[in-house]
Every structure is written in C-alpha cells, then in structure tokens.
Image (cartoon, rainbow, N blue to C red):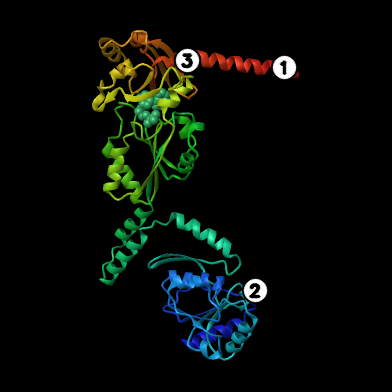
Amino acid sequence: MTHTLHKIIRYEEVIAPQSELNTLPILLRNPKILLIGGGKVALQKAEVLKDNNIDFKIITINILPQFKKLDIKPSLKPIEVEDIKRFNIVINATGNKDVESLIDKCKLTQSFLLNTVDVPEKCDFYFSALLNYGKLKVAISSDGASPTISKIVRNKIKEVIPSNIESLVDTEFEKRRSKIIDIKSVNRDAESLFGSVTFVGAGPGDPDLLTVKGLKEIKKADVILHDYLVSKEILSLVNRDTKIINCGKPHGSNNLTQEEINNKMDYYVREGKRVVRLKGGDPFVFGRLVEETEYLIANNIRFEIIPGITSSISGAGSAFIPVTARGTSNGFSVVSGCLKGNRFNDNWIELLKIPNHTTVVLMGLKKASIIVEKALRIGVKPNLPVAIISNATLPNQTEIFTTLENLASQSINVPTPAILVFGDVVNLRDKLKSNKNILEQNLKNTFEYYS
Ligand code: SAH
C-alpha cells in the first residue's frame, strides 16, 4: 500500500502538470488520517470525518472549544516530521507556512496523500460534497474548482433521494451475503422508494387559481390521475410527456372504482413514478382523501397533500357573494347534498333556519326539489335567497339568483358542477357588483377627464 501511494504521488508530480490533473473518485477503506489544525477550517473537516464515522487524529497547538462536542482527544503540540509517518492521509488545515514547508519536506521521503485546505496545488486529493446513507454514498466533486457548486448539486440530489434508502441497502447487503440475489425484486423495491403520490387541489377551474405549489407538482409529475372536476384549462398545463388518466365522471358509467384508482397509484409508484392525484377544489373538502391516504399508509407509499381553493367559497365569491359579511352572515357551513350511493343527505336542513348564516351545498343541484320540500316543511322562510352557481370561475360560469320556494323550478337544466348558496348574503351581490361598476365608471371618467 505504502509503495503504491508513493508511486501515485510521484506520477502526479512528474508527469501531469497541475492544471491537467485527472482525478479518480475512490472509496478508501479505514484510512489513517491526520488532521493538523484546531481552528474553524479544521473543525469543519473534523465534522465531516466524524459524520462519516472515520477515525482520525488531530495535532494542533491551539484548539477551538467547539471541538469538545466531537469527542476527540487532540495532541496539543507542534507538528513534527515523525508524527506524519504513521498516517497515509494528511489534512493540513492550519494555513500556516511553516507547517506547509515541514510537510513539503516530508513529501520528499514519505508516502502519504495530502490535502492542504483551500490550496488546490498542494493537494493530492480533494474532499467531495457527500451524501451518506449508511452503505450508500454519493460524492460530488468539481476537482476543487467550486466547492459551492458541488454543495448545490449535492443538495439537489438530496431532494430526490428517499430517506429510507439506507434500510433497503442494508437489507440487500444481508441478502447478498446469504447469496440471495433477485434482481427483479431489488429493482422493484428500489424504484418504489422513488415513487410518490401528491394530492393536489386544482381549485375551482380557472387555471390562474391553482396554487404555485400545485402547479410545480403538476409540472414535475410523471403521471396525473385526475377526477372529473379538473377543468380542461388546467389539464392543458400538463407537460406533453406526462401520462394523464381520467378517473371518472360524476355518476358516470366509466368511473374508475376507488379500488381501481388505488391500484393505479400503487402500480405507478412501484415503477418509481411521481404520481399527482389531481382533485377539483381542495382535496380536503369532500375529496375522498381519507380512503385514498388510508390505502397509501397501509401500503407504505409516501404522499404529500397540497391544498387548493375550494369551490365552496370561491364559487360564491366568483358570483360576488361573500360567504360572510358583517351584519348579514356571521358564519357559514359547507355541506354535501349527497351521501354515498347518491342518497340525499338531510342532516343539515336545520342550518337554513339559523339567522345570519350562509349554507353552501355541494353536490346538491340534483337534489334541489327534495331540499325545498324538506326546508319548507320545517319552516324555513320561503323567500330565503338562494344562488345557483355553475362552472364557477370558468369561462362558461352561469349564475341564477332566486329564492327557496322557486329553487326547484329554477334548477332544472342547470349545468353541473354547481353549488347552491343559501342565505341573505346572496342579496349583497347586487350591491357589491353595482358598487364595483360605479367605481369602475368613476375611474374611467377620471381617466378620460385627464387624458
Ligand atoms: N373538493 C371540491 C369539492 C368536491 S365535491 C372543492 O373543494 O371544491 C364536488 C362538488 O363541488 C360539485 O358537485 C359541485 O357542487 C362543487 N364544485 C366543484 N367545482 C365547481 C365549480 N367550478 N363550480 C361550481 N361547483 C363546483
């Protein structure tokens, strides 16, 4: 070993001029390392070595108190030629010229690899920016050209490496030791660690109402599984090479079942794909998130959830209806008109009797007549204002303003998806809208006056 190292050093010195050095990244087993220095730079190196469970000795005349936490016993003395003999790697982190010339002298007679921190021409090797996952290591180097770039690249790579890769590598190590080699299963297990599911709320429909985070995920996705509510405007933002799978229409015959959707997520994740489960509005609002995440949790599949703008609030807002307004509505409820199996949900009808309250009903359009019947039966005022807003925030948005007693007839032939908004706030819309128009007219007049 000593002989070979000696040769390498001679080769570099004699044959290759410094600027044309070629480097070879290798992993050294149990290197004997000497770190010279006890200042900030040495501390940083010591931390790297410690993080990588590498044994090393320190010789220094002064030492920062921070070294204490690293639990190493330094030799507090000036470095001598004799000290270097026992090591095959020397790191000079002193920045001191006398130490440098002492090492230069040793170089003539001893074989060791030298790293003089921040002096590339006095280095036989460079440190790499490291990622360490037990036996799996990623080393990035720019041959000393720019440690900063190396660190940036390392951090980018870190973002895509699953934290549980270490245990998979350990398991595979054990298997190999027992001569169990099943490449197919290693492939599948490793790929699936890279796969993930992100639930993204697509908002009510207008692509400009997507969240920035949601859009970023959509752009990064390999596969998009979307529900019927996701508008074509939003789907047009998906990259060309991303696979798009429509998981269903409302009460449509070609809906995928929940089990089929789960299987699809599972299949693509196991192929290492980034799956985006794109849902209308906010995935937490009537989004069947629980069923799908339960499945992922049970199957050890990583997932994230990115909220979206829910149609229940923005849908009303898009028709100039504020769900709350001082003196008119102190709060609001969001309910579903439908239960599983398209059964009518009636446990919320009493809400319509609460004064100064807004009730937004999702999935309720087709249940309008039964809502009216039940509400009138329990004494809700027949002239309670109601709005029906379809395709909210989309170019084909439609709005109908009516009252409870006329809701059933008004709801016939209204396109879906639609929300129903019950409450006196519905009447604020005229005021808001006309005030806005007056304001715009005023601004226009002012502008014309001055131009
Ligand atoms: N997670 C969604 C709601 C899913 S339930 C959200 O937060 O908005 C599906 C219901 O949402 C539809 O039946 C309809 O009532 C409502 N909906 C969704 N998008 C809509 C839109 N653009 N306009 C009107 N209603 C909408």
Q: Choose between 81 and 73: the one closer to the eye.
A: 73
Q: Nearer the viewer, residue 298 or 180?
A: 298
Q: Is mark 2 within 8 Å of ligand 1?
A: no
Residue pointed to by mark 3:
428
Check if mark 2's residue and mark 1's residue have beta carbons within 8 Å. no
Residue 310 picture quarter:
top left
The answer for how far apart the CA atoms under marks 2 and 1 are is: 69 Å
| Viewer-side residue, 372 vs 192 | 372
Q: With respect to residue 330, does 207 lie above or below?
A: below
| Whether residue 321 is visible | yes
**Gap between marks 2 and 3, in whole Å?**
75 Å
Instruction: Give the mark nearer the N terminus: 2 vs 1.
Output: 2
Q: Residues within 10 Å of mark 3 (few under 14, many from 20)?
A: some
**Left or right: where 206 falls relative to 451:** left
The label on residue 448 is: 1
Residue in the image at 48% along x and 15% along y: 429
Residue 391 can be seen, yes or no: no
The residue under the point 31% across, 59% down is 184
Examine the rendered structure and indicate whether residue 239 appears above or below residue 364.
below
Residue neighbourhood size for the residue with mark 1, other residues' Cα within 10 Å, grouped as few (<14), some (14–19), many (≥20): few
Residue type, numbered disc 2? Ser
Location of residue 440 in the rendering, given as x and y in whole percent from the top left corner: 62, 18
Residue 69 placement (x, y as % from top left)? 44, 70
Mark 3 vs mark 1, foreground winner is: 3
Q: Which residue is mark 2?
A: 19
Q: Position of residue 426 (x, y in %)?
A: 43, 15
Upstream in sequence: badge 2 or badge 3: 2
* Amino acid type assigned to the residue bearing label 3 in the image: Leu
What is the distance, in whole Å, between disc 3 and disc 1 at their CAs? Answer: 30 Å
Q: Which mark is residue 191?
A: none
